[in-house]
């Protein structure tokens, strides 16, 4: 099969490209390299530099594909609030461009949604039937993608699958970005012997899902397309507190650093745990990699795990 991966030079997209190529597919990547890097990209993939806000570039990239994985987005919540209009163009209009380009061939669209669509909904665990209550421009646009995914299926007959990723971590997540996930920041700081900063008391919990599991879910969603629109949580259903995480990162690295507790950040949600049952019943599996195992893989990719082993 020939697949398009938008955002294929980024953290999650580059792992997906590796899997698709290993499975014998042809892969075209459309990426503007705004946060992604060619260093992440498998040399066997075909690459086009372009922006998903450019409908002509998206149409050209979609011309011969059997399916599209749409991952390109401005993945920073803080940036989405600061640069509201521009992130809206990338994160929602970009999705509509991709879905519009899929109309002609009715090829499946598998796209990244986010747990951010739940916002301040405090249900534990969060299931797909719980009310979306986004609190950020990023969450609102991801919910908008799901609504347009529904329209694409109803009006244009395009099979669409939205995957609500929870907190994804693993190799190639850029720790230098101030918006990066807590795991890559902790791993980077432990490696450099610097203290870990925890906002609040550290008892807040998250559902951390390993990138290898996320890629399996993306692939399963493409291999089992259905008529219509569907959305799934991509999560483990397990809670890890930030305190616990700090401890696990130090254990995995075999190094201890100080942990500093700072004032809680406004709007920080106390607990965010997903319910993976819908995903498991559709695909026959759910993300299983434990945080301990995933951390060992991340740290060994950084050259640290070997020392701990
Ligand atoms: N990492 C997470 O924990 C997480 C959680 C929920 C959802 N997501 C979603 O998953 C997807 C991938 O996220 P990631 O963590 O790999 O982020 P990333 O920043 O590493 O990857 C995004 C990629 O999209 C590209 N891109 C950005 N704007 C573009 C544009 N206008 N045109 C073309 N390419 C563009 C970037 O250069 C980058 O290669 C995103 O849609 C993100 O919103 C990620």
Image: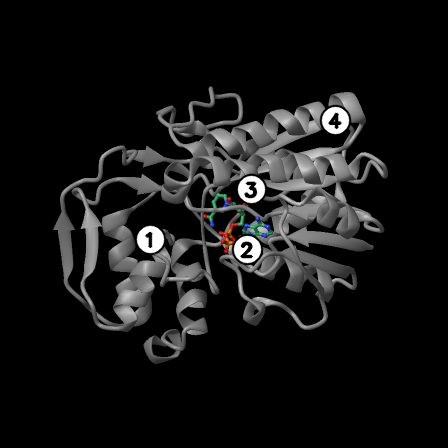
Question: Which of the marked residues, 3 or 1, is nearer the chain's N terminus?
Answer: 3
Question: Which of the marked residues, 4 or 2, is nearer the chain's N terminus?
Answer: 2
x then y, percent, for residue 202: 21, 45
**Is residue 22 found left or right of 132 in the rendered image?**
right
Question: Is the residue under label 1 in contact with that under label 4 (CB below 8 Å)?
Answer: no
Mark 4 neighbour class, 10 Å CA radius: few under 14, some 14 to 19, many 20 or more: many
Point out the residue furthest to the bottom here: 307
The Cα atoms of the two marked residues, 3 and 4, are separated by 21 Å
The Cα atoms of the two marked residues, 4 and 1, are separated by 36 Å
Q: Which mark is residue 90?
A: 3
SS type, badge 4: helix
In this rendered view, identify the residue nearer to me: 291 or 103: 103
Q: Which residue is mark 1?
A: 182
Queried on whether the Cβ of the residue with tag 3 lies below 8 angstroms from ligand 1, the answer reads yes
Question: Is the residue under label 4 in contact with that under label 3 (CB below 8 Å)?
Answer: no
Where is 27 relative to 269, above or below?
A: below
- Give the quarter of the image for residue 193: bottom left
Q: Which mark is residue 12?
A: 2
Question: Which of the marked residues, 2 or 3, is nearer the chain's N terminus?
Answer: 2
């Amino acid at each position: 099969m020939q697949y398009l991966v938008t955002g294929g030079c980024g953290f999650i997209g580059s792992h997906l490209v590796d899997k698709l190529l290993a499975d014998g597919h042809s892969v075209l990547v459309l990426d503007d390299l705004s946060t992604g890097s060619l260093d992440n990209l498998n040399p066997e993939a075909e690459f086009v530099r372009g922006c998903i806000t450019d409908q002509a570039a998206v149409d050209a990239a979609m011309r011969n594909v059997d399916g599209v994985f749409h991952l390109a987005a401005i993945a920073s919540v803080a940036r989405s609030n600061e640069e509201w209009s521009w992130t809206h163009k990338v994160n929602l209009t970009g999705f509509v461009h991709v879905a519009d380009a899929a109309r002609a061939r009715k090829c499946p669209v598998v796209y990244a949604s986010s747990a951010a669509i739940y916002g301040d909904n405090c249900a534990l665990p969060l299931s797909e039937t719980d009310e979306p209550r986004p609190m950020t421009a990023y969450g609102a646009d991801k919910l908008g993608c799901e609504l347009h995914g529904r329209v694409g299926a109803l009006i244009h007959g395009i099979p669409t699958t939205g995957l609500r990723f929870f907190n994804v971590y693993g190799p190639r997540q850029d720790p230098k970005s101030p918006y990066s996930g807590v795991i890559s920041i902790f791993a980077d700081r432990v490696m450099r012997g610097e203290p870990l900063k925890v906002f609040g008391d550290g008892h807040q919990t998250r559902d951390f899902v390993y990138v290898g599991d996320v890629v399996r879910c993306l692939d399963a969603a493409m291999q089992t397309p259905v008529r219509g629109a569907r959305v799934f949580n991509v999560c483990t259903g397990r809670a890890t507190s930030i305190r616990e995480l700090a401890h696990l990162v130090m254990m995995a690295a075999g190094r201890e650093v100080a942990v500093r507790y700072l004032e809680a950040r406004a709007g920080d949600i106390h607990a965010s745990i997903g319910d993976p049952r819908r995903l498991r019943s559709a695909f026959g599996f759910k993300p299983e990699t434990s945080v301990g195992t995933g951390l060992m893989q991340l740290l060994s990719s950084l050259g640290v795990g070997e020392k701990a082993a």
